Amino acid sequence: MQVSGPEKLSHYDAVWLSPHVYDALLSGAGRLLRAKAQGLKVLLVTAFGDERSEEASAVFARLGFDSLSLGLQAAHRRDRSYSSFTSRAFGSHPGDVACHQTLRRLAEDIGHRTKARDVYAPLGVGGNVDHRLLHDAAARAFPVGLAQNILFFEDRPYALVPGAVRLRLAQLAVRLPPAITDIGDHASLIRHVRSFLASPVARASLKGSRERLRCLWLAANAYLRARGWQPRKAFGPRVQPIVDTLDPALTNAINDTLAALGDATRRLIGSQALVARANAAYARRLGHVGAVERYWLLLPPREAETVTAVRDSDPLATFP
């Protein structure tokens, strides 16, 4: 069912905040399908863009999820400075502060009306400005405590690029619990940048050699600025990784679901064979065999701890 507006919302067990149509489904299909099998009531909220809302709501309804489109303008429609893939991945604009405030207000309203136990939001992997805005708005909108679990999903397909998740965690200067010794996403500068530029979403979006060179330069600089991240001493939010292993039957169900999303989605993630290889490589980096999904649970801050900062390479990681 498509909900016409936040004022029509009632109780849900889980709310997924998706930057664009299908982002949450691409990133968390395994957990979403498990929620459906368990009979949980799930709401999928699309923040930006409404040109495919009717199509998407039909897909979500067929899968057993309610949906809500906030109808905010995506970056390329908000400002001409976001006309290129590179500007959206690495840029920011002063006008985004108003968009962030709107997102935060809407997220608070949705949380209040739904009373959802679990709230999912993008981590912001890959750098897309809409993903970064929604991540920060959600992180600020929901209180961390016993009432709700705030979990950040790793934005796919960007999270499948070696080193991309570690880069984003470094940009946010997250602090990891002492028991977490390795996040399993190490990659050299060359491997990370080459994989990022070779990803289906980048190849489909980058226009001309000039933009490719600019994207390469900015991606390399972002990687280099994030090298100083110390996950035990950083000053940012405290998070706990949670890894879901996906059995073959669930993996097949995910593949069938994603295959039904159409050509526009395949343009971003590539062929089914390419996705399978990227998922397998990602799982191996995390020390698993088969398919997995990883989420980052937001933990309460520990004010007594002494922390040190690294330089933030993401201008939209925080807002005043």
Image (cartoon, helix red, strand yellow):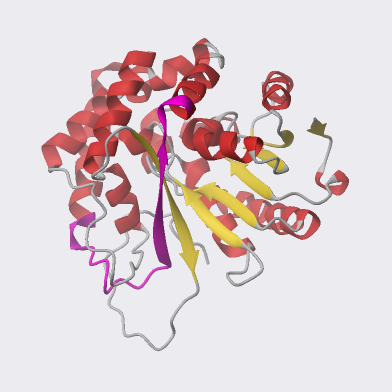
Magenta stretch holds residue 211: no
Measuring from the top left, give residue 145's x and y in whole percent.
59, 72
Residue at figure coordinates x 66%, y 47% from the top left? 15
Question: From where the camera sits, is residue 94 visible?
Answer: no
Residue drawn at the location 72% of the way across and 25% of the way down: 57
Q: Which residues are magenta?
A: 226-249
287 or 233, which is in the foreground? 287
Query: Split into 4 quadrants, where in the image is the N terminus?
Result: top right
User: Is 186 left or right of 37, judged from the image as shown?
Assistant: left
Image coords of residue 178 (percent x, y): 28, 72
Residue 190: percent from left, percent from top: 12, 36
x then y, percent, for residue 229: 23, 63
Where 278 sits versus 220, above or below?
above
**Figure quadrant of residue 279:** top left
- Which residue is painted at 62% across and 44% down in the image? 16
The part of the image, by quadrant, that contains residue 20 is top right
Q: Is residue 186 left or right of residue 40?
A: left
